[in-house]
Amino acid sequence: MNPVRVVVVGGGFAAVQFAKTLRSKLRASECDILLFSRENHMVFHPLLADVAGASINPDAAAAPLRQMLPGIECRTERVQKIDLSSSEIEFDDGNGALTRLHYDHVVVACGAESNLGIIPGMTDHAFAFKVMYDAVELRQQIVREMESAEATTDPDLRRWHLSFIIVGAGFSGVEVAGEINELVRSSTRFYRNFRKEDVVVSLVHSQDQILPEVAPKLREFARKKMEKAGITMLLNTRAVAATHEGVELNDGRMLKGATIVCTIGTAISPIVQSLDVPKERGRIRTAPDMRIEGQTNAWAVGDCAYIINAFDNKPAAPTGQFAERQGRQAALNLVRVLQSQPTRPFRFKALGQLCSIGGYEAVAEMLGVHVSGFLAWLMWRGVYLFKLPTWSRRIKVGLDWSWDVLFPRDLSFLNTDTTQQATHAYYRPGDFIHRQGEPARVFSVIEEGQVEVLQHDPGASETKVLAVLGKGDFFGEGALLGNRPHETSIRARSAVRLRQIGSALFSQIAGSFAPFRDLLVKTVTRSGDFWRRLPISKAILEGESIASLLDPLAPPLLTKETTFADAVSALNESATGNLLVLDEKQRLWGTLDRGDLYQIITRIAVTSAETRGDISRLKLSDLLIPNSIYVALEDSAQVASATMLDHGISWLPVVQSKDDPRPVGLLRGEKISKRMLERIGQGQPTRARVAS
Ligand SMILES: Cc1cc2nc3c(=O)[nH]c(=O)nc-3n(C[C@H](O)[C@H](O)[C@H](O)COP(=O)(O)OP(=O)(O)OC[C@H]3O[C@@H](n4cnc5c(N)ncnc54)[C@H](O)[C@@H]3O)c2cc1C
């Protein structure tokens, strides 16, 4: 008889324990076990904070699956789809091709993903703390910031480099805060330009106590000890946005810091999302024996599963402790199914909780006994040493820990060249992206939002807004191509998301890709040269308010929900041919003119007939790109004309103010030109200003 084929999807606590237990119960001739994991190693999450804090080496907390699991076929491939009806999985073979494989039983153990997207800007500016790469990157970052703090002569900048913000004070947040604090403070003696007092480690937590899962006495102990070690606790406080500068808090404060670690936010793994099975808050609901509800040969264990613990009839916690027990018991239940015996419900009494808080201290709740301080720390180390998956890891970690007690932590880091990177960045309204006079480091393309281009003339008290840039526009190219400091400042008008390319990578692309370079050169020379040749016009328009040139809003005003057919007839009836599209709060969402109509039709014409459907019923929200360019009443006519010039357009919507994007009228290029000629004809009060 052919052996039963069991496919395990995942390579974490639950999957490894499942595969090990099944192999110990069934011989290879009875059962083929194939384990698919995205990584070729199992990550021992409880030690990630130690990796970030440089008290152990990364390889000590990552155990290679094929060495851990003899007798099991380990495949480093991502499973793309599980087809429960045909009992097949589809996986990426690493060369881009998808392969299907039949199974007799499948075990879904793919854990959960981290999700920084829950707070604006976190994805761009914070470190997640879930996989080994996160911990290794964080360690690099901590040391890099210490080196930058040593190099700078600006005390504010030094403090920013030495400020570390950790969001979330659950187990992982507390552990990583403790480790960062320990690493940075214990290393200050190797640097000349800063001391322990200059280091700021802040823990931001939305509740009134850290570690909500542990007993109140232990929580209190942990909080006091961490505060004594220099960690600032910001309790009952939520992070609402992250930027290059730091974290914005719900009370409006800006917590500045170069390093942000976000330990909150989990997401359901895509493979679980794609499964059409009963779920509870995204996790797969299982029967008591851990088979997926309604399935006979599909199982779910670990963080991706919603399993009721028969011990207390409560949902099992998403922890490694539970994941391991579930993996083990699901394997035993599968053996029972194959031997036609009744299965058993999942039942487990949690053994306790352990959390290291830095400085050779921990809190522990083991079998009802509460321990804190150094003894708890010894227990923490002992338990995790024992729980490591192989003897070689235990010895490695044991040696690293002994080294850490006797010698200082390792401060070497591999200098990754940031000028070679392409990254994202998020800025809040009012944040400076770069300032006039600063050296050019990145080329930026606006993905969302608007920025304003500002110039500060030496001797002048005011900073002038020169133009407004929006989605798809770019900046930074002039300074990079000319190898000179920025001639203007760029400030976010609304929340802005940028795609940024480091200077070295930019030079490579601009050097080898001629059309791109030509486009950049044209952009650099266009608006700057124009105004240089017309200084009088520039001065006149700077003194001219937009309000005096405004055309009132003419109906109809369209909405995102307006259909294509209705938009076409509105354009036909419109005298000007320039229409505004509003969102549900009556804010400006987009614009529509005849040129847009032509582009929409061309775009639809090249899509497949299936996608096209009934064009007339498509809504503007499906057809137009939002975030149109606009100016505000407080801007000058010069800003408006520079913006039109930069974008090659002849009209612009005008909104109430930068903070209130409700439209108040339209501004046309011809009206601005007419006003300018009138002023020139009247003789120039502004001439003197230009000459000076
Ligand atoms: C920083 C941190 C510290 C923690 N500390 C503790 C602690 O002290 N004690 C404790 O009990 N718990 C702790 N936890 C929680 C614990 O790590 C998780 O509960 C546990 O890892 C869940 O195990 P799992 O097997 O379900 O998922 P995971 O261990 O996350 O493993 C999921 C696996 O599935 C793989 N995978 C996902 N999708 C696919 C796919 N499509 N194809 C192939 N492979 C895929 C992944 O690569 C990964 O190998 C901690 C977690 C973190 C992040």
Image (spheres, rainbow, N blue to C red):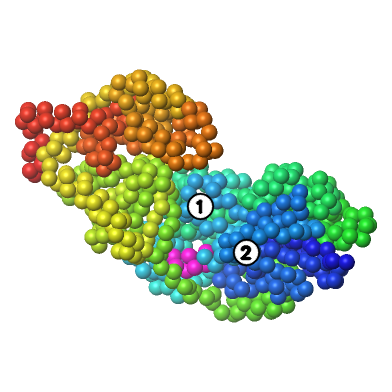
- The 10 Å Cα crowd at callout 2, few under 14, some 14 to 19, many 20 or more, is some
Residue denoted by label 2: 93
| Residue 223 locus on image (x, y percent) | 62, 56
Report the amino acid beneath label 1: Thr
| Residue 572 locus on image (x, y percent) | 35, 22
Per the picture, the main secondary structure of the magenta-coloured stretch is helix
Report the amino acid beneath label 2: Asp
Decide if residue 203 is in sight here.
no
Q: Residue at the location (90% across, 55% down)? A: 343
Region rendered in magenta: 138-145
Q: Is mark 1 within 8 Å of ligand 1?
A: no
Q: Is residue 564 magenta?
A: no
Name the element at disc 2. Answer: loop
Residue placed most toward the observer, 425 or 260: 425
Left/right of residue 510 with respect to residue 61 in the rendered view: left
Residue placed most toward the observer, 34 or 282: 34
Q: Is residue 141 magenta?
A: yes
For residue 407, which numbered disc appears in the image?
Answer: none
Q: Residue at the location (41% across, 47% down)? A: 447
Q: Residue at the location (81% across, 48% down)? A: 295
- Identify the image quadrant of residue 476: bottom left
Name the element at disc 1. Answer: helix
Residue denoted by label 1: 123
| Residue 457 locus on image (x, y percent) | 18, 48
